[in-house]
Image: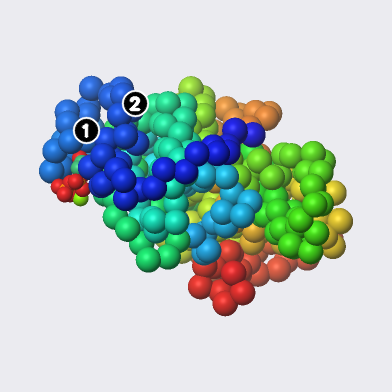
């Protein structure tokens, strides 16, 4: 995991807004020729010779993240990942980001340095330019809004709407780990409240905790598909759980779907942790969320190109819309898929 903890506390008021922006962004380098003007003018200027994709996401303290177990460096990294994942889901290359921040003055400068260290690491690893943002105060807590920009050839952009009956449904990686990581972190937080001297041993859960705290967007999958010469007919990233993402594909493409329970890829740690928490692992994959894997459909003809690839699993196929969207269980019964995906408006979140 990433390093955190900086003992110094410099108050934000001392720096002022401009000093703060300068201080936080001075070490970012521009890497793309398409970035003509980054930070430092009234607006950034960029020039994509191809089509441009743009996506934005809000992260709110107390709704989307909890700083009692989320180190700020991880938060910065994750905030970038959440957005890049959406760019990759369009089969585009991510090139630029902007970062907008509202912070209460309970945060010292060192906290924002940690946050920007995570943003800087993500920008470096994923090769994107930080080209602007906005900085303001908040009366309570922290809000981060990141916008990610990308480019793609017109004919390579994958919309949610292109799936056809008989297309195969494919997912990258494995599912449910981030949700189970969150369950473990929430449990340890409760234990800590009762006994602050109790240092939890999270090592058996390291994979799932890392998936929650430091997710990686699937830049590699978009690149792999290009190498394999596979153009998905439709694609979406899995932020709210497999079930609701499948329903988005079905609705936008006007198709149905059969999803096979036995095919859903699960890490062994997810299976054992689900047993420990007495939760059904299929439910976790369907409704857990925050996996940031890619879910896409391909023509049957492309099956040989992806067959046996350890990063990709065929989990079902699309049908006529009239057949609806179903989970085919291990016992071979059909259950209608419902969008019980993670919902930030739920009262108990
Ligand atoms: P304006 O008042 O014209 O909106 P600002 O003073 O807010 O300009 O911002 C000055 C420059 O710093 C702009 O290029 C803006 O995009 C950039 N910027 C502001 N806040 C951030 C931030 N949190 N992260 C990165 N760049 C930022
Ligand atoms: Mg501004």
Determine which residue is flagged by label 1: 38
| Front residue of this view, candidates 152 and 104 | 104
Furthest toward the bottom, the residue is: 347
**Mark 1 and mark 2 residues within 8 Å of each other at the beta carbon:** no
Where is residue 173? Give x, y as percent. Answer: 64, 38
Vertical arrangement, residue 5 with respect to residue 279, above or below: above
Vertical arrangement, residue 232 with respect to residue 196, above or below: above
Determine which residue is flagged by label 2: 27
Quadrant hosting residue 201: top right
Where is residue 138? Give x, y as percent. Answer: 36, 62
Q: In the rendered image, which quarter contains the C terminus?
A: bottom right
Vertical arrangement, residue 307 with respect to residue 261, above or below: above
Q: Is there any visible trace of residue 241 in the rendered image?
A: yes
Q: In the displayed structure, does residue 144 sit left or right of residue 304?
A: left
The alpha-carbon separation of the residues under discs 1 and 2 comes to: 13 Å
Q: In the displayed structure, does residue 42 sit left or right of residue 185?
A: left
């Amino acid at each position: 995991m990433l390093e955190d903890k900086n003992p110094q506390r410099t108050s934000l008021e001392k720096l002022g807004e401009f000093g703060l922006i300068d201080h936080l962004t001075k070490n970012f380098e521009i890497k793309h020729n398409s970035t003509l003007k980054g930070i430092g003018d009234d607006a950034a200027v960029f020039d994509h010779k191809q089509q441009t994709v743009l996506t934005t996401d809000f992260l709110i303290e107390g709704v989307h993240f909890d700083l009692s177990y989320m180190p700020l460096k991880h938060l910065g990294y994750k905030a970038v990942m959440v957005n890049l994942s959406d760019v990759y889901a369009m089969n585009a290359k991510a090139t630029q980001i902007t970062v907008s921040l509202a912070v209460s003055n309970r945060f010292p400068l060192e906290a924002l340095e940690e946050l920007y260290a995570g943003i800087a690491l993500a920008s470096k690893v994923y090769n994107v330019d930080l080209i602007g943002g906005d900085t303001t105060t908040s009366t309570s807590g922290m809000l981060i809004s990141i916008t990610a920009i990308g480019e793609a050839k017109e004919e390579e952009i994958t919309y949610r709407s292109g799936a056809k009956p008989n297309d195969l449904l494919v997912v990258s990686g494995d599912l449910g780990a981030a949700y189970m990581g969150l369950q473990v972190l929430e449990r340890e937080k409760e234990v800590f409240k009762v006994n602050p001297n109790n240092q939890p041993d999270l090592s058996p859960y390291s994979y799932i905790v890392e998936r929650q705290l430091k997710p990686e967007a699937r830049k590699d999958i978009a690149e792999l598909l290009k190498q394999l010469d596979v153009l998905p007919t439709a694609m979406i990233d899995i932020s709210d759980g497999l079930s609701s993402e499948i329903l988005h594909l079905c609705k936008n493409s006007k198709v149905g779907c059969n999803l096979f329970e036995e095919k859903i890829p699960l890490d062994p740690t997810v299976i054992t942790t689900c047993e420990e928490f007495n939760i059904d692992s299929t439910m976790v994959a369907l409704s857990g969320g925050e996996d940031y894997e890619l879910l896409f459909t391909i023509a049957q003809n492309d099956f040989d190109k992806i067959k046996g690839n350890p990063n990709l699993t065929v989990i079902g196929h699309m049908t006529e819309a009239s057949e609806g969207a179903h989970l085919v269980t291990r016992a071979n019964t059909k259950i209608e898929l419902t969008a019980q995906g993670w919902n930030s408006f739920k009262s108990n979140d």
